[in-house]
Structures are given as structure tokens and as C-alpha cells.
Image (cartoon, rainbow, N blue to C red):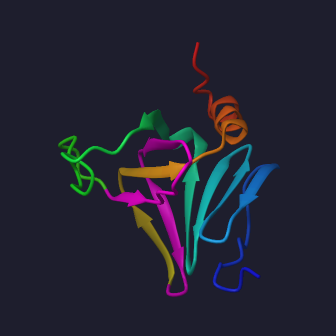
Amino acid sequence: MYNDFLQIKSLEGELKLSHKKREFGITLSTKELVYQKPHVNYIIRLDGIVTITPYEPTEARGRKRGWTGVPTHELNGLAIGKDHYRIYTTGAIMHSRSGLFTLGATEFVLPIAPEMLRAIGRYSGLESF
């Protein structure tokens, strides 16, 4: 069913949640968040997450990259009817069929279910008050 998705070879920490849809997947352990798209995985260490904020696309910044002035890679996984969040991290690893590549400071815009968001907050230490 998910033939285009790369298998997660190793996951650091204990597996806690995994959500898979046709166009993306999110897997969470106590140490890492893995965002899966067909043919590529993005591995985000939870201790590298700086902020998680709600994302609402606007005309002014909908497709513009690096609008914060910080050099970033913005990866949009927009799904209609879902809550989206901007995750800013100090770095990530991209795993494609060509190998592993280290990314610097990166912003991800991802559809995240409330249950997954609470778990990410709990294991990353970023729970809101």
C-alpha cells in the first residue's frame, strides 16, 4: 500500500506513535520525529526543536521561503482540513534513495493531529502552559 515510502531503518528512542496517510506519515519516538513523504524521510531530533507554532497560510507568505530572515528550508505538507504547525529546528537529516543528507536550521510546516502534537510536546519538553 505504501510502496513509495522509504522504510525507517532505525529509530532512536522508544516508539510512541505513528500516523500514516496516503501522502505522508509521522512517526514519533522518545528521541525523534520522522516525517515521511514518498521517496524521502526527514528525521528531526526532539532536542533540536526550538519552537512549534500554529501555521495559517496567508497570501503574503504562502509560498515565500525564509520570510523570517533566517536561512531555512520550508517543507510544506499541507493537507486540506487539517491543523498545520510550523516546527523550527536547529537541524534535520534527510533520508532519500540517494542517501543521508544533513540539513541546517529548518522549518517544517506539517499537518499534525492533536494527539500527536501533545506527544511531541511531552517528549521534546516543549509543553505549553
Quick check: is 78 in the magenta stretch?
yes
The image position of residue 19, as x and y in percent, is 73, 56
What is the span of residues highlighted in magenta in the rendered image?
73-98
**Depicted 64 relative to depicted 5: above or below:** above
**Depicted 37 relative to depicted 28: above or below:** below
Quick check: is 119 in the magenta stretch?
no
Q: Residue at x 71, y 50 (%)?
A: 28
In the displayed structure, does residue 78 sit left or right of residue 12? Answer: left
Closer-to-camera residue (106/36): 36
How many marks on residues?
0
State which quarter of the image contains the N terminus: bottom right
**Depicted 43 relative to depicted 121: above or below:** below
State which quarter of the image contains the C terminus: top right
**Corner quadrant of residue 53:** top left
**Corner quadrant of residue 55:** top left
Closer-to-camera residue (104/121): 121
The image position of residue 67, as x and y in percent, is 20, 45
In the displayed structure, does residue 28 sit left or right of residue 126? Answer: right
Q: Residue at x 58, y 49 (%)?
A: 45
In the displayed structure, does residue 118 sit left or right of residue 103? Answer: right
**Corner quadrant of residue 73:** bottom left
Q: Residue at x 17, y 43 (%)?
A: 69
The image position of residue 2, as x and y in percent, is 72, 80
